Amino acid sequence: AMIAADKNGVINTVNKASEDILGLEKNKLKEVGIAELFKSESEIVNKINQALSVGKQFHIASKSLELVPGRQVVGNIYLQPLWDEERNICGLLLTMEDQTYVSYLQDAFKRYVPPSVSEIIAQDPDKLTLGGEDKILTVLFSDLVGFTTISEKMPPHEVVILLSQYFDEMTKIIFENQGTLKEYVADELMAIFGAPIYQPDHAKKACESAIEMSKRLGALRKIWKKQNRPVLKARIGINTGAMLVGNLGSTYRFSYGVIGDQVNLASRLEGLSSIYGTEILIGENTAKEIKNDFHLRKIDLVRVKGRNQAAHIYELIDKDSSPLTEKMYRFLENYNKGFSLYKNQKWSNALEHFTSANDILPEDGPTTVMIKRCLHYAENQPVGDWDGVFDHKTK
C-alpha cells in the first residue's frame, strides 16, 4: 500500500492496494488524516508526527499493526518525508507491506518443520497443492513401550502432561536436526528427514536425532523417577529409500507426508525392536549412508510381514565420535563372530560366541534371541537351501 499525505498529514493519494489492506474504500481515505488510520497514541502515530515535524525517516516492523477499522496487519511500515525545492517538508509518503498471510503460513508450518524451513515454504505458498514426487529420504518412527498399560493407571490429565513433556523434548531434537514432524499418533511420533527442503545428509540427521532422543529420554526418566511418575522407554525405527513425498490426501483435506515400501519398512523396524530388545533399529540403506559416522551392529537378515524382499537390519549404538568401552568392544567382537558363524550354519560354534557375549552383557536382547535361534536350528536343521533370512509373521 502507498499513501501520500500533505504537510498537515491529510491524505491526498492512495493506490488500490491501500484499499485492500486497510479495508476502506478510496473515497473514505481521501481528506482523512493519515494518523487517523491507526489507533491513537500508538507507536506508528507518534512516528508519523515526528516524520512530519522534523523530517525523519522511519521503518516500523510489527507482528501486529492495529488499524482503526479493527484490522490487524503483520508487516512493515516505511515513513518517507517529502520535501519541496526549498527543503521544507511538504508531505509524507507511507508505504505499508502486508505480510499477514506469510506470517500465518510460517506460524502454521512451525508446528511441523523447523522455523528456517517454514520461512522458505511461506515465501512460496504455491507449493501447498495436492500432489507428490519421488525422492530418496529418511523416515523415523518412535513409539513408547507399553504406554497403553501405563496410561490405564493414570488420570487422563496426567497422561496429557506426561506425553506433552515427552513430545516437546523429542520434537525439539528433531527440529534441531532439520527434521519435519509428520504427526503424533497416540504415543507414536513420525518424522521425515530430507524434505520439504532437501538435505544430502538426511540419513545422518535422522540417526543423530535418534541418539539424542535416547539420551534425552534417559535424562527425563531420572526426573520422572524423582517425581514418582512412570518411567517411559521408547523404541525407534529408521529407514532410508525412495518414497512418495508431498501433500497427500484429497481435495477436501490433505497433509504433508510420505508413503511407500521404504516408509512401511521403517515402521516395521520400530516394531521389531520389541522382539530383539533393542532401542534403535535401522535399515540397510540407512546403514550404508552412515556407516562411517556411527557404531553399528548387524542384528539379522529379515523379511517383515507384508514384504517379499529381505533386508539386513542394524542396531544404532552411538556416534563414531564416542569411543566404545573395552567391555563393549569385547562384547561386539564375540557377538559379530557368533553372527558370522550363525550365517554359515555352524550352530555350536556360533552358540559359544553368543554365550560369551551374553556373559559380558546378560541383558542384551539380540544375543538372547540368537542363542535361542542356534539351539533351535541345532535340533531342527533348516530345510533346503537356507539363505539366512528370518521371516517375521507379525507386525
Image (spheres, rainbow, N blue to C red):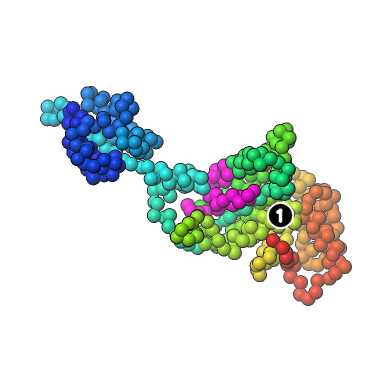
Measuring 25% from the left and 25% from the top, which residue is drawn there? Answer: 49
Secondary structure under the numbered disc 1 in the rendered image: helix
Residue farthest to the right? 379
Reply above or below: 339 against 164. Answer: below
Q: Which residues are magenta?
A: 169-198
Of 61 and 138, nearer the camera is: 61
Of 326 and 7, nearer the camera is: 7
Total marks in image:
1
Relative to 106, 70 lies left or right: left
> In the rendered image, which quarter contains the C terminus?
bottom right
Of 247 and 20, nearer the camera is: 20
Measuring 18% from the left and 34% from the top, which residue is drawn there? Answer: 31
> Which residue position holds label 1?
273
Residue farthest to the left? 85
Relative to 107, 303 lies left or right: right
- Please state the horizontal and vertical placement of residue 294, each as a whole percent of the image: 65, 50
Of 259 and 104, nearer the camera is: 104
Q: Amino acid at mark 1?
A: Ser
* Badge 1: residue crowd in 10 Å (few <14, some 14–19, many ≥20): many
- Please state the horizontal and vertical placement of residue 217, each as a whole percent of the image: 67, 42
- Please state the horizontal and vertical placement of residue 118, each as a whole percent of the image: 46, 46
